[in-house]
Amino acid sequence: MATRTFEFTPGPNIDALKDDPVHGELMHLNLGPQHPATHGVLRLSVDLDGETMHNVVPDVGYLHRGKEKTCESLGWAKFFPHTDRLDYVQPLMNNIGYALALEKLAGLEVPQRGQEIRVLLMELSRIAAHLIYLGTTAIDLGAVTMFFNTFKEREKVYTILDAYTGHRMNNTYVRIGGVFADVDDTLEGMMREFLEQFRAEIDSFESLLTGNRIWHDRNRGVGTVSRSDALAWALSGPNLRGSGEPYDLRKAQPYSGYEDYAFEVPVGTVGDCYDRYLIRVEEMRQSVTIALQALDRLHKSRGGEILIEDRRYVLPPKHKVHTSMEELIFQFKIVTDMCLPRGEAYHGIESSKGELGFFVASDGTRTPLRCHIRAPGLYNVQAIPLLAEGRLFSDMVAIIGSLDFVMGEVDR
Amino acid sequence: MEDFLVILLKVAAIYGGVIGTAALYTLAERKVAAWIQYRIGPNRVGPWGLLQPLADGVKFIFKEELVPAGANKLLFRLAPMMSAVPAMLTIAVVPFAGDMTLFGVDTFGAIAKIDMSAFYVVAIGGLGVYGIILGGWSSNSKYSLMGGLRASAQMVSYELSLLLGILSIVVVSGSADLYDIVDAQSGAIWRWNAFQQPLAFGLFVIATFAETNRHPFDFAECEPELVAGFHTEYSSMKFALFFLGEYCAMIVMASLTTTFFLGGFEVPFWADAPWVIQLAAFGAKTAFFLFLFLWVRWTLPRFRFDQLMSLGWKVMLPLSLLNVFLYGALTSFGAFGD
């Protein structure tokens, strides 16, 4: 097997420089874990030579809550609410990623309408997550008002998610084999109205930032990753596509019927912060397109099944539980003792941050033998030294912002 | 005796007015930011939130004063004063209105008339940087140190452009007295230096942003990377003094821009307006620049430090020098003679 090589220049030795007349002593700085720019509790250990950063070492784990172990002790279905708390800016994406892995393990096929609802909500989640990226990166680079612009839109997304799933955040809307409840068709108008006006809103975001000379100067050429480096460091999502690799799991390994939707995958040329910014903005536009297509399909498939009828995994309707003995037994069995077949499965989805994968191994009992979450954020954090070495201290905030990770997912 | 009382009255009125404006300006900052960002802003204390600055002041007084371990205590306490005092001293020569008669005493609308007042403001205003660099250094914090270093480098660089802008005004006006500079712009709107010297005007306005450490040049604070920059470790009234110094400096810079470039207290189309009207005209022109500070802050992203320095040294300074040379030559050929 051919090994990939990648270039990584380590920083200067802090002790060797002490007697250097030009550099003198480097200043060691602990950035975080409580620091306004680290997007949560990331700690960075940096050696500063004036304004230049050397020996940048990210230190993760301050938000570790043992989610994987929790999954291994809680059981299959009870872990869904915990997935909400992984990447908490896009809970539905995590729900669906986990559900897809379980369905792969159990060999289940989600009904058409269930898949359409999932696609619609995934794209809405992607919009919400990219809005967070845009707002927080802009606030780090000094454009504070952008944060409020994006949060105004995110508030609308939350309102819609509330109407669709019953929760603004931490939705836990997805179940093994489909989704928890059918969407109300009267909400279609609300959704369409949002998507249409959101297109204009993206243009106004761009009018504030894309052509802005300061924004351009702060991002262009900063944190550049070459295509081979991006692959070697296992970057994914917009961070990988920014470096020119058109790898999108929605196209490469379609799931939930993504192969039937028409959309484009934006790809960058340089691989710097500016490219990653442009890609995320374009992805929001593509998400609007996909969501509109999903809405059209939902319009046609009204009344269709949203959840499989499989009493091994799916809870029976409540009114039947109250009237029929078999259904009561099913309910009892599922809640207390639901087992997935022996085996293992991995499913990755294209979350807003990159490849979000769930690996589950089962020995046929009611708890997973192993649950591993491939969080894209962890790989993005790992790339910080590569991007930041030798750059100016102020570039750190642009790099952290453009890598776009959420510590809830990185530390799990 | 009456002369002395009138001077005392003027000192009280001008300092009271400026500090009151600074307090209201903090409220305005939050209100304008709120309007730009789809928010309401402070509206709980007093009608329309007008008493908010008072509530903030009370809060600051009752906050615990912390001096970090290892800090240089003397300089740590001195720095906030050194930041606030120069801005206030500069106010003394700003002409708020023309000649006036108060209680039978003929006087003028400034605390002092100095024939070198245009350079006095730069000399005294330049001292403000000491407060920032000492505050940053004495806190014994790495973030504060970097904030102080950045701010001092930046203020020194941009003072050059500021001074060269003033120099070309002085050359054209033929005097370094702020009253003479205002007089030289009287008569018609097109005689305002903003129209006579558009290049110097633009450079001066940009330099005022850098000089007052305002966004997009606010490297002294730079909250994402430096937490709060030079005043990271400050609390209570010491922090409030830094704040007061910053807002006073902005008011000074806005009034100076008005004086140098927008005809100061001159009322357009009304040459011999009463001093109250002149004061109002001065206030209106200054308010525009004060609003500009807020508008820019809540719209633009922030520069990077090296970009700011290269803008200052490679673009602004050569252009300022060119401007001085150009208007010096024009003046010596008699282009601005009456």
Image: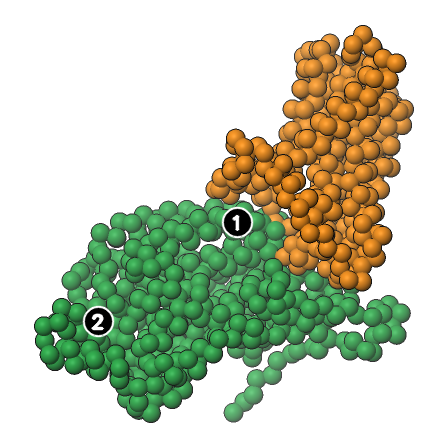
Q: Describe residue A167's horizontal placement relative to residue B173 as left or right.
A: left
Q: Is residue A399 above or below residue A311?
A: above
The label on residue A411 is none
The residue that appears at 12% across and 80% down in the rendered structure is A326
- The kind of residue on which mark 1 rests is Met
- Please tell me if label 2 and label 1 are on a single chain: yes
Label the green chain with its letter: A
Q: Is residue A337 above or below residue B23?
A: below
Q: Describe residue A296's horizontal placement relative to residue B337 as left or right.
A: left
Q: Is residue B193 visible?
A: no
Label the orange chain with its letter: B
Q: Are marks 2 and 1 in contact (CB under 8 Å)?
A: no
Rendering coords of residue A129 (x, y %): 44, 61
Mark 2 neighbour density, 10 Å: few (under 14) some (14–19) many (20 or more): many
The residue that appears at 78% across and 36% down in the rendered structure is B87
Rendering coords of residue A23 (x, y %): 83, 68
Q: Describe residue A157's horizontal placement relative to residue B236 as left or right.
A: left
Considering the numbered disc 1 on the image, is that residue within a helix, a strand or a loop? helix
Which mark is first along the chain, 1 or 2? 1
Residue B199 falls in image quadrant: top right
Rendering coords of residue A294 (x, y %): 28, 60
The residue that appears at 82% across and 14% down in the rendered structure is B107
Q: Is residue B265 visible?
A: yes
Considering the numbered disc 2 on the image, is that residue within a helix, a strand or a loop? loop
Rendering coords of residue B291 (x, y %): 62, 34
Residue for badge 1: A146
- The kind of residue on which mark 2 rests is Leu
Mark 1 neighbour density, 10 Å: few (under 14) some (14–19) many (20 or more): many
Residue for badge 2: A307
Q: Chain of mark 1?
A: A
